[in-house]
Amino acid sequence: MTLSTPLVWVIFPMIIAVVTGIFYYRKVLIVLLTSLTAFALAALATFFPEDMALSIGPLTLVFDESLNILGRQISVIYDMLPFIALIYTVTGLWNLSSGIAGVPDIFRPTSLGMTALLTAALGVQPFLYAALLFETAILVSIPTLSPPGQKTSSGILRYVTLQTLAMPLILLAGWLLTGVETLPADSPLVGQTIFLLGLGIAIWLAVFPFHSWVPMLSQQTSPLVMSFLLVIMPMAVLVFALNFIDRFSFLRELDSLYSSLRLMGVIMIVVNGAWTAVQNDLKRALGYAALAETGFSLLAMGMYDQGGLSWMMLLFPVRALVFWLWGYALNKIEEHSNSLELHDVQGFARLYPAISAGLLMAQFSIAGLPLLAAFPIKIALFTAAFELGTGLGIMSFIGNLGLLLFTLRLLSCFVTPRDVTMPLWWSFSEKAHEYIPILIMILVLIIMGLFPNTFFANIINTLTAFRQLQ
Amino acid sequence: MMTLSALAFILIVISAMIILIFRDWLINAVALAVQYLAAFILISLSWPIGMAVIKLIVGWMATAAIALTLFRQQPSRGTSELEASLFFRGFAGLMIVFVIFVTAPALQRNIFPQLELVIIQGGLTLLAMSLMQLGTHSEPYLTVFSLLSFLSGFEVIHAGLEISTLLTGLLAVSNLGLALIGVYFVVKTGETDESTQDEGVE
């Protein structure tokens, strides 16, 4: 029997997303169904045989890598499976924890639908049509980010506006790229095409100055939902961007492209690191920190010659786990504290030490503290940045310090009693279902920091999908 | 055909100016529908009528969906604005049209030699006017109207460059998806306004 991989990783989850979308109010059932589907697809992608044939008893399923739709193809090739496993694991993890207060019911089906659309976007041929699938994923995310009953905020309007403006830019750049391949590198059309393409991707990635929607939306949305968006979209866009460097040799050989990526990355790290440092709103800090992380990914991409693409891929799973913990802990803090202003969470750790520890560990981890998950990658990135230029290294290090500074401010706030009436002793007010996921994730972050090669190696295999980038 | 395409361009300029200047949802919805008709005429210069008509149907469906929702949610259309702000937006719109007339021939010469000038002018007018619209208001439904105009402008230009069934289908999905988001925003705004009023009464 012959099936196709897009049927498994695109069409099937889309059907589940539609069905669960109809019955979205059946909370427990939908949590189980969406998370099980996502985890099952992630496991299948991880253990899928290279010969694309699965034997289940007497039945042998042979998988084709492509599916024809309206004269075009959607392919899910074997080399992309590690990345697909990662995005479905992310979706499963978020869905599994989405039963907590503050997360809209519609999040579960939409997150699964988004992941299916992004999977399709990474495999559609010609790959430029991916822009439209990204746009659809963005539109699908809106009811989750701005749920019914909540005022339509300026953040959500900016989000939909900017992300929609990016799509035509990418499509137009894609059309121009096919024409400029044969032109000499100094042709003005080459520069104009790269500008259009860069602008489109920069808008998608919320690169400065197109970032304003991120802190605004972070402030107005459930942190767990926002962290999902801030993890899954940049990862998919960055992998999509690799397609351009892989397919167009003139782009690959353009030195100024890499220096621009490095510059853009460092600007994002410094600007967003500084903004994180001075934040008083924990939700906005989440948004700025995610933008700084995107900066690190761009910096890694810009260090292509130094092996930066491997670091970029390695940052993905760390980013996913850390931002899950960050979003989950923030959601829990919001549940107990009502406000996420820094002065309102003063003394919070004295009542809820596990949740506070979870948030602090997530932030320390993303800041690259030794023994935690991001440390081995961040240290390699900083070293390479310093080797390329002292200024580059110092600037990215300073940007990273911003996050550390914010975490220290938060730590100080968490442990300082709010007022004299607050008891001096510490209590443990969390319930088991609240602190167990946090403790497990803290443990995972420590183990990942101690044994990075054990957990991270597989994701680098995604790069084999980009033949010219080997 | 020349007369028809020139008429389409004039319709695009007038309808885009109306959406830019006025804040009455009914006038804007009619202008958007006219804009889709004009865009269809320009697209039909590059595509077979059978394919081009998809854009018209999708555009009208999107407009009708938002307009009908607005009709249910906001039966009163009255808006009071200073004459100066209307004048400013009108003047800005005229400036945009002027800039497009100046730049379009160069763009045709250097980047899109295969496109007729009127297609570039029509597409650019829609793109630039919708960006201006986006910068001058914060109403959810107007944001969606402007985004639909922006996509429409892009489609006018892109239709002359490439023809693909899948692309047409995906763009139709994006347009209708955007319209649904517009409907969602309008309904949500209506609900939150009602709940605010209820709280006020209590």
Image (cartoon, rainbow, N blue to C red):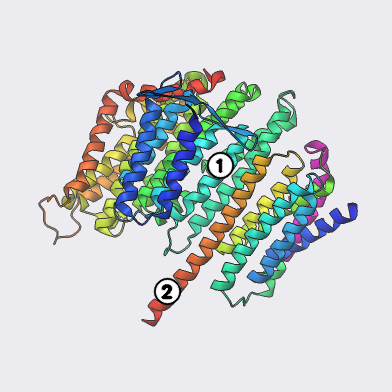
Q: Circle 2: is it few (<14), some (14-19), or many (20+) Cα within 10 Å?
A: few
**Disc 1 and disc 2 in contact, CB within 8 angstroms:** no
B90 relative position to A213: left or right: right
Q: Nearer the viewer, residue B71 or A243?
A: B71
Range of magenta residues? B89-114
List x then y, in percent, for residue A227.
39, 45
Relative to residue A205, is residue A244 depicted above or below?
Answer: above
> Taking the image as drawn, is residue B147 in sight?
yes
Residue at mark 1 shares a chain with residue at mark 2 = no
Chain letter for mark 2, please.
Answer: B
Q: Position of residue A214 (x, y in %)?
A: 46, 49
Q: Which mark is residue A133?
A: 1
Whether residue A48 sits left or right of residue A164 in the image: it is left
Cα distance between the residues tagged 1 and 2: 37 Å
Image side of residue A452 versus residue B2, left or right: left
Tell me which chain the residue with mark 1 is part of. A
On residue B87, the disc is none
Q: Is residue A363 left or right of residue A109?
A: left
**Viewer-proximal residue, A368 or A89?**
A89
As rendered, which of A193 and A77 lies closer to the eye? A77
**Number of other residues with Cα within 10 Å of mark 1, as a class: few under 14, some 14 to 19, many 20 or more:** many
The secondary structure that most of the magenta stretch takes on is helix
Residue A360 occupies which quadrant of the picture? top left
- The picture places residue A348, in percent across and down from the top left corner, at 21, 52
> Magenta segment: does it hold B110?
yes
Q: Amino acid under label 1?
A: Leu
Residue identified by numbered label 2: B196
Q: Residue placed at 33% from the left, 32% from the top?
A: A368
The answer to whether residue A312 is visible is no
Residue B168 within the magenta-colored segment of the rendering: no
